[in-house]
Amino acid sequence: MDRILIVEDDIETAAAVAAEVRGLGCEPVVIGTLQEGIAASAEDFRVIVLDRMLPGGDGVEAIAKMRAGGARGMILVLSALGRAANRVEGLEKGADDYLPKPFEPEELRARLRALLRRG
């Protein structure tokens, strides 16, 4: 079973993402802080769903640390910062996809399926 790391501090959003992950037949692992997310990202995850604004810093700024620490999974950034400039910045800093909040569950599922196919 594929594992998906969810680094999200909002409990409701984390639960919603975890439900979608389970619906895809994958195992969700939820972590609420950036530092714990960076540490956990070195484990074997097919996809990492990463909130941008987390306790401890900016998730997009942490992508390089995750990669340097051994993270191999595809990274989907979820963020309330949804302007085009924010999305471009996230992609330029190493995210494989960027989904603004609030998001539609159907779009999240479709993006996760696409990353699972590529990853």
Image (cartoon, rainbow, N blue to C red):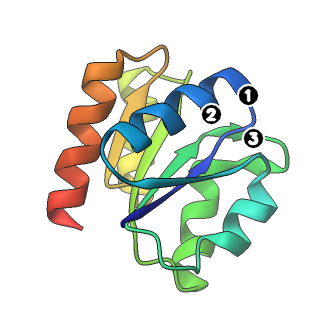
Q: Residue furthest right?
A: 56
Q: Is residue 85 above or below residue 106?
A: below
Of tags 1 and 3, the one toward the viewer is: 1
Q: To which residue does mark 1 refer?
A: 11
Count every numbered label the image shows and give the total. Answer: 3
State if disc 2 and disc 1 touch (CB < 8 Å).
Answer: yes
**Distance Cα–Cα, label 3 vs label 2:** 12 Å
Tell me: residue 51, above or below residue 106: below
Do the residues bearing badges 3 and 2 touch, measured as CB atoms within 8 Å? no
Q: Sequence order check: which comes first, mark 1 or mark 3?
A: 1
Q: Quadrant of residue 106?
A: top left
Left or right: residue 8 versus residue 109 is right
Q: Quadrant of the N terminus?
A: bottom left
- What is the CA distance from the residue labelled 1 to the residue labelled 3? 12 Å
Q: Position of residue 68 (x, y in %)?
A: 56, 84
- Residue named by callout 3: 54
* Residue type at numbered disc 3: Leu
Q: Check residue 14 in the rendering and tell me which mark sits there, or answer none.
A: 2
